[in-house]
Image: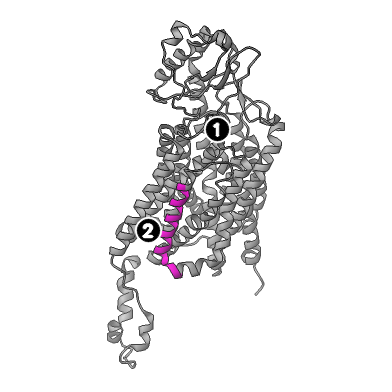
Amino acid sequence: MSANPQWDISRALGVARLFHLVCGVRDACVTPFLTLYLRQLGLAAPWVGILMGTKHLIAACWAPFCAFLAKSYQKRRVLLIVSLLGSAGASLFMVLIPALGKNLEYRSCNGSSSVTTTVVPPGVTLTVSSISVPESASKPSAEASSLPARRDAEVVEASGLRNEPGESDQEIFSDLYGYSVDSTEGTRTVSQVLHPVTSGVKANSWEAVYEAFNTTLTLLPEVPELGTLANMSVAKGEAQAFHFSLEGLQWTFILSLGFMVFWELLTAPLEQVADDSLYEYLDFVDATDRYRSLWIWRSLGMSAGVCGIAALVEQLDCFLVTNGPPGVVHFYGYSLISTLALLVSIAFPVPAYRRQEPSYKTVKALSLVGGDPRLILLAVTVILIGAVVSNVQNFLFWHMKDHGSRELVMGLSVALGLLGEILLHPFKTALLKKLTRVGVIGLGLGCLAGQLLYYSFLWNWWSVLPVQILSAISSGALWWAVGASIEDLASPGTERPLNTMFRGHFYGGGCSLGSFVGGFMAMYFSLAVLYRTCCVVLLLWLALFLSIQLRLPQDRKINYSKLLTVEGSDTSDSEQGSERDWLVQAMREEHSDWKD
């Protein structure tokens, strides 16, 4: 029998490894840094949370639907090509979204990370504090003296994050949203400007914010020496006419939301369609055992890509853009790697036959979850993990940026976690056997809680790196235990639908919920409080998870070794003897629902 090139397993696995590697590099170009770019556009934490929550929600609902349609109409390869080509073009739209304030000038190219602006970001009230003045000009005017001095006022970043009590003014000033102040001979020295104050004013109350802004501006005309404050040569009347850039905020947010929805609709189906195609291709020749190790190639691609793109951003951003927020190299790199992945997808193994499978497996998997308390407990755990991890993915880079980290350090922190998972993988079987699946899930939740607590106490730009090695357990081993539990509790034929439901619907829904809630918590409290809250919630759920797990009745599994001790080894093979056979009886009871 001549070899059929359609079932060339070695070639198919080679192409699949290359595809996963390239897609890992592609995802690493933008995904980890997307929220950081949105912050640099001027969007506050709640708006970024809404954008990311919408992104996760679309991925959780849209990807399975597109995968079903592509399989039903045998258009998987077409969908792969359209997804890669469309996302490559859609990623370039993001660089066209204007940042808040048309006169932003980023000085990261000349060795300074400060920003000089003549426009105040929307959602920010102004306060002038820590002003040292000459004795000849130290007497305040009557109008200015009517307002109480607030040298130790509570300070919040322009991103909407509250400053920690122990954080120095210098640390705040070095943030991306700390604006530089030009000073001239004989003028007053200002150490803090353009920092929002939220005492008694809600950030989402635009009328109150605008009123506070006008109140602050009344101080400026009384002090001639502050005429050069933050290069603000705009008259008070012009500032009032500008209406605090509210219209600019609305347009930036709406355009970002439209971009996010359009981009995710094109990108979301890619991974699931590719995985389904490759699994069915290998399943036809009983080679699915080789499918399980392909995730390593995607992790390797992400590890290399996240560090490589961060290094390129620092070198090329100054040459590609002179006006606007830094980071456009992320989208250019994403588009370029998407084009390379498009070429690889032409040879990606896609089965050319139509498998006759029941179309109700997803519904059956959902009913299986509803009828098994262990799966319900596992589903709630996965939702909670998604909610917590989304806040790490969304705002950890913000926290690192506040402490002076560069993007290369941020990329290295992601790469350390991915490499830790790869190095731990050879010990997967031994780990699950020694600690059991429940024990590994508990250990993973505990390590994740420890990471969150550590994140809340970051003290400098490199301090996040040591704790990232725990991601090998809190991300890798935790999901291995979840997958093993799903396979153990699933009925025959529902393993993959259950895995897809847990990783797609439940985890994606948790990420969406966590993004929506986390953005507002970061604004009204702080990132440190957000991470400590998530840590406490995880620890409480860990205690509840273990206590419930111990009280659940253990399933009585079939012990096939009993076949050696069955009484009456010469039992007749008649129909009556078969009915009395304990093995046949047990298997019929276990799988009666599935056969129906």
Question: Which residue range is magenta in the image?
Answer: 433-453
Kindly report the secondary structure that dominates the magenta region of the rendered protein: helix
Residue 170 shows in this picture: yes
Circle nearer the N terminus (2, 1): 1
- In this view, 590 is above or below 143: below
Determine which residue is flagged by label 2: 365
Residue 435: in magenta span: yes
Q: Residue at x 46, y 27 (%)?
A: 155
Helix, strand or loop for disc 2: helix
Between 239 and 572, the residue placed more toward the observer is: 239
Which label belongs to residue 171? 1
Q: Amino acid at mark 1?
A: Glu
Q: Split into 4 quadrants, where in the image is the C terminus?
A: bottom left
Q: Amino acid at mark 2?
A: Ala
The residue carrying pointer 1 sits among few (fewer than 14), some (14 to 19) or many (20 or more) residues within 10 Å by Cα, namely: some
37, above or below 561, in the image: above
Residue at x 44%, y 36% (from the top left corner): 526
Whole-Å distance between the Cαs marked 2 and 1?
51 Å
Q: In the image, 510: left or right of 1? A: left
Q: Is residue 357 magenta?
A: no
* Percent of width and height locating residue 380: 36, 52
